[in-house]
Amino acid sequence: MKKAISVIMASIMVLGLAACSKSEETTTKATTAATTAAETTKAAETTAAETTTEATTEGAKEDTGSLIKVGIINNDPNESGYRTANDADLKKMFTKENGYDASFAYSLKNDEQIQYAQTFIQNEVDYLLLSAADVAGWDSVLQDAQAAGIKVILFDRTINADPSLYEASIVSDMNKEGQTAVDWLASQNLSEYNVIHIQGVMGSAAQQGRSGALDSKAAAESNWTIVKQQTAEWNAEKAQQIVQSVIDSGTKFNVIYAENDDMAKGAVAALDAAGISHGVGKDVIVMGFDCNKWALESLLSKDWNYDGQCNPFQASYIDSIIKDLESGKTPAQKTIIMDEKGFDAATITKEDVENYGI
């Protein structure tokens, strides 16, 4: 009997262990299935996230690709108040918000500007905007741009190049600026004109236009003498040194014809240091160009005599031309001349200073 009971108990234990084993196997399979499902869900979520990221990136690429790519070559924005205003006007216009992807490069040297132009061509810009440091030397690089399908627009300054190499130019008439200034000076009816002529960067359109009229007048009139003619490269300190050298030499002069306001300011600093009066009814006539607000205020206070306007706000004209070209239209004008005039200390008003000062 004891033996029979032992056999029965052993059988019961075997059956129990088998049941436990079966239960554990079922639990393991259920756990494995749950893990697999979770991994599948995670993989699906990851794939969806990657797809979304790719779509977003592609969308960003499409947005960037829709921008008009422009390379803008300008003179140093620290060159003068005019150039600072010109650069700020361009940067305000050529933004992503206005549909542009713009890159800027600056130099007062023609060879460096040409290198920048070649880089922009290699970068496949849509438009090359150029304010040239020198009127010469641009044919080759503009031909390269044209061959690459890049449209060139000149601003601020002209160049000596075939007009077929650029789409349009938005520029000041520098010859007219010079002639207007010289005509004003002639109207002062001095018995003799002994002029210190302070020039800008040699070879630039501004220098050539503003120098040309004075050179012609001095050559034509026996009572006009240029006692000193030298470039100060638009720089006030260099202009001050030039005038100081004339003062130190004892040479007689009664006119300072400076080709921008900053150089006129430097010239006046030399006069002040030497105790020489200047302005309306004083010993020396002071002339500048660009119409910085502080320069027009010097006219208003009669410390200066004349200032020739040079309009720096060309960006809206360029934008309009680009929009025409993008829509397949030919610009209405190949050359746009900025509206400009000269200001006389005898007639300038506070309203002029506010309206025309830059």
Image (spheres, grey):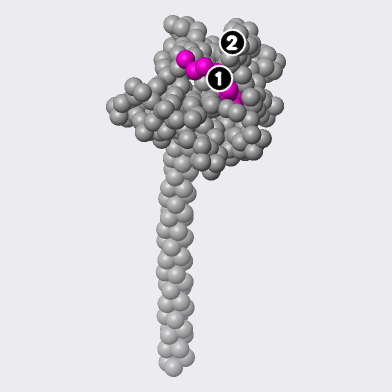
x and y, in percent, of residue 31 in the image: 43, 63
x and y, in percent, of residue 129 in the image: 54, 22
What's the CA distance linking mark 2 and mark 1? 10 Å
Helix, strand, or loop for circle 1? strand
Helix, strand, or loop for circle 2? loop
Amino acid on which disc 2 is placed: Glu
Marks 2 & 1, CB-CB < 8 Å contact: yes
Residue shown at the point (44%, 24%) measured from the top left:
306
The residue labelled by disc 1 is: 193
**Residue in front for this viewpoint, 159 or 252:** 252
Identify the magenta region: 189-200
Q: State the mark number for residue 283.
A: none
The residue labelled by disc 2 is: 221
Amino acid on which disc 1 is placed: Tyr
Q: Is residue 180 visible?
A: no
Q: On the picture, is 225 further left or further right than 308?
A: right
| Residue that lies at the very extreme toward the left in this rendered image | 351
Residue 32 to residue 349: above or below: below
Q: Which image quarter holds the C terminus?
A: top left
**Residue in front for this viewpoint, 22 or 53:** 53
Q: On the picture, is 225 further left or further right than 338?
A: right
Q: Is tag 2's residue or tag 1's residue first in the polypeptide sequence?
A: 1
Residue shown at the point (46%, 41%) measured from the top left:
53
Residue shown at the point (51%, 41%) measured from the top left:
275
x and y, in percent, of residue 298 in the image: 40, 33
Residue 143 to residue 348: above or below: above
Q: Is residue 20 visible?
A: yes
x and y, in percent, of residue 88 in the image: 45, 33
Q: Which image quarter holds the N terminus?
A: bottom left
